[in-house]
Image: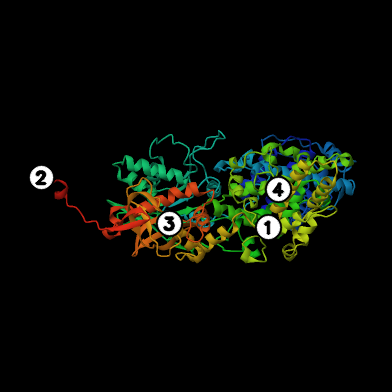
Amino acid sequence: MGTGGWDDQELNILIHEYFEMLKAELGGHPYVKRRYNERVVQQTGRTASSVEFKFCNLSAALVDLEAPYIRGYKPRSNYQKRLFELAGEYIAQVSKNDFLYGEIDHVSPDGRRSGTDESARLKENVENFQSSPSETYTHSISVVSSSNETRTQESDFWNRVSGLWTRATGGESVADRPEVIASEQSINDPLGHLEGPRSAGLKEAGEWFASGLEETEVPRMLFLIGGPGAGKSHMARSLTFGLHRIAPIDDDLAHRTYEYSGNKLPLKLVNDATIPSDDYPELALSHEITDSLNSRSHLIACVNRGMLVEEVQEYVKDKRADSRVELSAEIIRRIKDPASSTYSSGNWSFELKGQSPYIQSGNVEIDGKLHSRVVVVYVDVCSLLEPSPWVQILDDGDIVTPGYPVSTGNKSSDEYASSAASRLLSAVIEYLDMPKSLSTEAETNPVVANILTLSNAQMRNGLLAMLRSAEIYTGNRFTYREIWGAIVRSIVGHLPDTTLPDTVTRSAVAGLDGGNSSPSKKFEAMMIAGDLRISNSLYGTSCMPKSDLPDPRKNPVTRLTCQIDPLRDSVAGRISDPKTLGWASPVTDALSGYGPGESPLKALAADQDSTASDFVGHGITSFELNLDEAFRNVFEDPRTKERDRAKYVNWYGAYLTRLYALYQGIPAFKHDIELWQQAWKNSPQIPKALEVGLRTLLRPSRNPEESISRSLLPVLDSRTVPIVGSVVRPKLALATENYELETTSHGEELQLELKEGGKVVGRISLDLSLVREANACSLNYSGVTELSETTLPRLERVRSARLVPGNLTPDKYRIVDGNTDYIVKVSPVSKESLSGGNHD
């Protein structure tokens, strides 16, 4: 129980607890909903918010059964047919009349028993309830008329939208801890039942660990490694659910460790290794592993990568004599760096096996016998925006898994739909369940327009493509915390940063004064509302030069997405003509040929690239149509000043550029991103288009015009900047040969290796900044981008590796003077020669 659809046993538990509350309500007795919710949670393993949502479904079923329901659980339609059937059977079993009018002997969760002679009052309450003039009963919801039904549906919808605030960046439900499952915070989290698939290997590792809780001989250790928001504590909460906690502290605070009696062996949970330990001021994690080894208990450890580094540094600085703590510290060292996979000392040994970058397994042995099984999951290696690789953990702990796949080029709809982020996004849109009656409000309400946009698979794919491009460009993975932040921002924009959730309806609507608004006021109101549209809010920056929006660099989502804002790289060209490497010509053509009575939006929609992808059918909402009309009105209004007209044209051009790019899934620097993806896929080979630029960066010729010109590195300068052109003073330099270039990949990291004669003489991370610098090179001349200041020091470091004494060869030295260089042969000098032969 606890995952997938609700089975009959779970539904019957839910129905029983619901009717207990209903009896109390109809009998006029006080009761606490949270306690009934906790009962269902404890018996089914469902989340508290999922139970709350199901209670609302049951209310809708009771309405259709013409039975009273709990007012506090507003009916929500689209319930399971089986829920309706079981509710009907329950009513028939207890006898509907007896239930409604019979005697009550009710015991509330707090232990107070109600009286038994209250039939008259109960009957009166039921009759008043059913004859209330504000409600009649129709299918799935109680209303007076269709207009009341519509208002109720719309009100419920906006309540669901306001729940998004809890999952926005910094929202109250972005963190997790073991005891939260029975807390009021969980009950108040309306989105708690919406969960995407777990990170690669995490689900399988959890199942492996759960099966081992029945073990009596070999304890299991599960290490979950990665940054915050990746689902480590969420998995830990699931694995410890239902276990008896030893000496719980009811202070509503998150703790570093939790201990449970377990099924057979005890279990220790390190839920947050960043919280200081009260027991161990130094090497806390090492001691906690040692405690688990000594007590033969299971262990779950949720550890940020930074804590691994700190623990290893502290251990290296001050090694402990205790061999058991030494073993634990060495386990941590190998988890941090799996390349060093085996360790043994005395009668203890630890081996970490497997080549996967995201999951490893191993064994701890003592005296040659198996002591503990270990699985390590690196939860932030695989992208949630890529199809998740399958994993199988065998009974002996060995892991079977394919290589980590990274899609290249344009993905298919199936590839997008199979990613964890896509499944979560679809679930959120389905949960919001926007009534059709609100569709007309999209003209002035960007939130409604955003939901209409995200209801379209093509636009969802465009959003996911942008997020994936942001990952590749910045070298950072989106955790579920950032994925949630991106989803919320795509629906309600920056509103969670600036307004309260109960004002979402008023805050989202463009402030228009009916027909009395001047064209300029109407368009400026639409501009403000336009900043909430997904195509603008995704990047955290307004299309207006000056804006009051929060700094995008301070938001965990927009600090990544603003890097691939299409406005940074709107290159002229067409998607239908790959040779141009551009895409923005349809937008510029629509605006450049604009005249009175014409529509830039219609011109863009009529473009051949737009019609080929059905931009009109999928990408445009009534908000864009209204915005376009407002733009035409203000542009053609003779009262509009030229300065303002230019501002409006710039804003609207930027708006259309972003919208068109989002629909097509085109980020800034699209060509560079695709080239990196191709390099990753072809590793260790490098695409020819990239290799030429990399060679120019790493060893630029002294004279780019001459094909035989060498690359010369100054030997005695403070910086290893290659000599180009003429020099004023003679310099000692080293002539470098043409490097062999290869790449190695680990997860999504690419390392570029420089080799001479098969020997590695330098390494550098091949990321997007280096790819962009390489693509800026032309005809053997180095190019320049805004990233040059950060890439040049890295290039100098890899060049300086060539000057290490072990890599030097005597016949490569040159004296460079003016435009000429002279060969200098350097011979080794003995110590005796340096000391003048004096051995005293």
State if disc 2 and disc 1 touch (CB < 8 Å).
no
Name the residue type under label 1: Ala
How far apart are the alpha carbons under marks 3 and 1?
33 Å
Q: Is residue 5 visible in the rendered structure shown here?
A: no
x, y (%) of residue 409? 59, 64
User: How is colour applied across the structure in the image?
Assistant: rainbow
Quarter-of-image position of residue 559: top right
Q: CA distance from mark 4 to mark 2?
A: 82 Å
The answer to which of marks 4 and 1 sits earlier in the sequence is 4
Mark nearer the N terminus (4 vs 2)? 4
* Contact flag, marks 2 and 3 (Cβ < 8 Å): no
Q: Earlier in the sequence, mark 1 or mark 2?
A: 1
- Residue 107, percent from left and from top: 70, 38
Q: Position of residue 617 (x, y in %)?
A: 77, 61
Residue 838 got which mark?
Answer: 2
Amino acid type, callout 3: Leu
Q: Amino acid at mark 2?
A: Asn
Q: Residues within 10 Å of mark 2 (few under 14, many from 20)?
A: few
- Mark 1 sits on what residue? 584
Residue hosting label 3? 698
Q: Nearer the viewer, mark 4 or mark 1?
A: 1
On-image quarter of the N terminus: bottom right
- Say if mark 4 contacts mark 2, CB within 8 Å: no
Rounded to the nearest angstrom, the CA distance separating label 3 from label 4 is: 45 Å
Question: Dividing the picture into quarters, in which one does residue 18 lie?
Answer: top right
For the residue marked with disc 4, what is the amino acid? Answer: Ile
Could you say whether the residue bearing mark 4 is in a helix, strand or loop? helix
Q: Secondary structure at mark 2?
A: loop
Counting residues from the N terminus, which is met first, the one under dot 3 or under dot 1?
1
Between marks 4 and 2 in the image, the one whose residue lies nearer the viewer: 2
Would you name the residue on which mark 4 appears?
A: 491
Residue 218 lies, with reference to residue 646, above or below; the image says below
